[in-house]
Amino acid sequence: MKRLFLLVFVILCSCQSDKKEKESSLPQQTLQQILPPEPYFVDIKVNDVKLAEPVFGNWLYSRNEKGQTFEQFIKTKHVVPSKEENIIYLQPIGTFNSLQVKQIELVRQYLQIFFQLETKVLKDVSNDIIPNNARRIGAVGQEQFLAGYILTDVLKKEKPDKGVALMAITEKDLYPKPEWNYVFGLASYRDKIAVSSMYRMQKEADFNLSLDRLLKICSHEIGHMFGLHHCIEANCVMNGTNSMVETDRHSLRLCSLCQRKLNSGLKYDNKKRLLELEKYFKGNKLNEGLELMEKDLKSIQ
């Protein structure tokens, strides 16, 4: 049992943030102007699924996260798109097979719909950009890259035109610090950069499951860049996760509270977004996502 506890302890979460946001002095009048929630968010709340009590090995079992209310979100400094910065960029790093290339394009399409912002894929860069001192061999012999190096020494130097968020995608496994096992992704709120790994998302002979996982981790990491904390209110794509098993249990959908937070800054048409997500899930045979969008659409009729 002791050995099992130590093993679980070193398995890392789906993401970590290297910076905490600072609260801004937003006038109380501004808070009052945006409350109460629009009918849309009230209507879809019926489809939120309450999180089950965490068990040993789950993200919330060993972490006392307080969550983030809508009011706390509004008072916290976070990225808001503008005319000067309104494009999400993806930066592939590595050598990708044909299926991975297809998945990256599908991720681009999804993020463009999910955040209702133009999303572009930059030209691939070689793994050679990662030096030996930012690499190691993992527990089962896989090569791992230091996630923080990709943020600070690769992405931070890039300034793509009109970029509001920049996320690297690598086919290599990631680790955040020497004493930790692995990490699915890493984000810096302040610098508007993130990295996600495809390595643990891949399920041989199951393209759709691999894609589903990648959509979750990528939307999760970019969600952090737009100010969303880990969600403890409902089954939500912003839930923290300790393992791929836990990730698979989490929803692709943003809960009603997280949707309200995101929409407050991005100001998109909620129904248009739902219809586009429904079409995407249907076209790519992602049945779970399709069912979720159909429920939300039914709730707002």
Image (tube, helix red, strand yellow):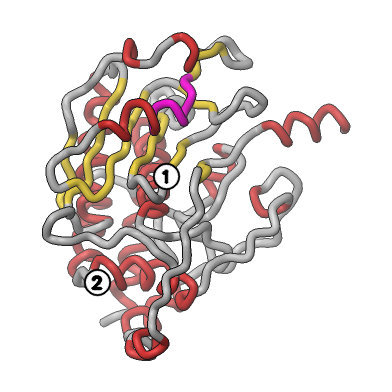
Q: Which residue is mark 2?
A: 270
> Which residue position holds label 1?
188
Find out whether residue 45 is within the magenta segment.
no
As drawn, is 120 to the left or to the right of 133? left
Determine which quarter of the picture holds residue 80: bottom left
> Which is nearer the eye, 92 or 1?
92
Residue drawn at 46 percent across, 39 percent down? 186
The numbered dot on residue 266 is: none
User: Where is residue 106 shown, x and y percent of the image?
Assistant: 23, 39
Q: CA distance from mark 1 to mark 2?
A: 27 Å
The structure residue drawn at horizontal position 42% and vertical position 20%, both measured from the top left corner, is 172
Element type at mark 1: strand
Mark 2 crowdedness (10 Å alpha carbons): few <14, some 14-19, many ≥20: some
Percent coordinates x, y for residue 299 in the rendering:
34, 79
Q: Amino acid at mark 2?
A: Asn
The C terminus - image quarter: bottom left
* Rendered-image quadrant of the N terminus: top right
Q: Is residue 256 visible?
A: no
Q: Residue, x 33% and y 31% (percent of image)?
A: 169
- The magenta segment: 145-151
Image marks 1 and 2: residues in contact by CB distance under 8 Å? no
Q: Where is residue 214 drawn, in percent x and y?
A: 38, 38
Q: Please state which amino acid type lies under the numbered disc 1.
A: Ser
Q: Earlier in the sequence, mark 1 or mark 2?
A: 1
Residue 214 drawn above or below residue 136: below
**Residue 146 painted magenta:** yes
The quadrant where residue 150 appears: top left
